[in-house]
Amino acid sequence: MDTILLRPLGPGKSVTTVLWLVLVAVSSAYAQNSAGLLLPYEQRTNVVYAEVHGTGLLMDIFTPKANRNGLGIVDVVSGAYRSDRGKIRDHTMAQVYAILCSHGYKVFAVRPGSISRYTGFEMVDHVRLGIRHVKHHASEYAIDPNRLGITGASAGGHLATLAALLPHEATPDARDPMLRQNSAVQAAAVFFPPTDLLDWDGRPATAEFVGPLLFLGGVQGQSETEIQERARELSPARLVNAPAVPFLVIHGDADRVVPLQQSRKLVEALKAAGGPAELVVKPGGGHPWLTIPQEVKLMAEWFDRQLVPTEEK
């Protein structure tokens, strides 16, 4: 689980870095034991799931070694809207893959590209391409394409939420057979996501933060109307207008990077539209927190309730 940078490098960045160093230390026993004990998954790295402008988009695939349930989870791997391999490492240290695979899920760690090259709109499209890829190859991956979950944290949680809420129709006559699949998921569980770029704890998010998400090259030269409209289109809390899939949102009440208000607004909007949504607040939780594997386990158990067929429970 990673951060999104809302300000220049400074105290917020250093605090988060320290937290991650401590988390790595706390997780070291797990990592060291894994050298002598079998991990609960096999990992395929750098699988190309789509091509955009001649560039491959990559994902890692984590397959359970035992107790497979025939279900898949798409993990949107993005921190600070960057998706390098370091983000895979961070999710590994947070035990995302070990815990989900121990519950029987095949996990598709989709990397949607980075803000240095793509806008937020393009990164969301890349997430949806990842979902379509998984569905197109569902028989090869031995999963049910109609029972997919999606997760992500911070920037990844933002993109995962948008992917779960935006239209996801298939294109039946598309030349690319992958595009004949829809991008719907059946459940979404996200950690500390940005959800309203126009109301960032009482004021708009800074242009420094949202600019590259909205327009390549930032907001310079764009009108205030254009900026606000584009920001609204990337604010999932403002896009909920009908019952959505079940949502679980997990957020710490001491988060200094993404305000807890962002998750509260999303859950309120989902409930107001008639959809099931649950907010779990971690007392003292920052961005992230040291015991986050506990909440990853909670997430896995929640996915069990949402995705596992009733007759198998």
Image (cartoon, rainbow, N blue to C red):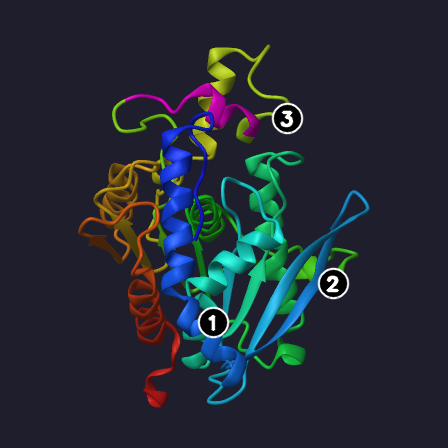
Question: Can residue 136 be seen at all in this image of the molecule?
Answer: yes
N-terminal of the pair, mark 2 or mark 1, is 1
Left or right: where 177 falls relative to 109: right
What residue is drawn where x is 49% and y is 78%?
34
How crowded pointer 1 is (Cα within 10 Å; few <14, some 14-19, many 20+) is rated as some
Q: Residue at x 48, y 70 (%)?
A: 97
Does 88 sit above or below residue 167?
Answer: below
Reading the image, the residue beneath label 2 is 177
Q: Amino acid at mark 1?
A: Ala
Mark 3 and mark 1 lie on one chain; the one further toward the N terminus is 1
Please identify, in this view, whether the residue under mark 2 or under mark 1 is nearer the observer.
1
Q: Which numbered tag is attached to residue 48?
A: none
> x, y (%) of residue 266?
30, 43
Nearer the observer, disc 3 or disc 1?
1
Q: Position of residue 8 (x, y in %)?
A: 46, 25
184, 72: nearer the viewer = 72
Write down the region rendered in magenta.
Answer: 203-212
Tell me if residue 294 comes above or below residue 22 in the rendering. Answer: below
The residue depicted at 67 percent of the width and 66 percent of the height is: 45
Write down the quadrant of residue 199 in the picture. Answer: top left
State which tag comes first along the sequence, 3 or 2: 2
Q: Which residue is mark 1?
A: 31
Give the class, few, some or many, for how many residues have Cα within 10 Å of label 2's Cα (few <14, many ≥20).
few
Pointer 3: what residue?
Answer: 216
Q: Amino acid at mark 2?
A: Pro
Work out how far the residue at label 3 is from the one at label 2, CA to CA, in angstroms: 30 Å
Kindly report the distance in space between the C-alpha atoms of the residues bearing marks 3 and 1.
39 Å
Q: Secondary structure at mark 3?
A: loop
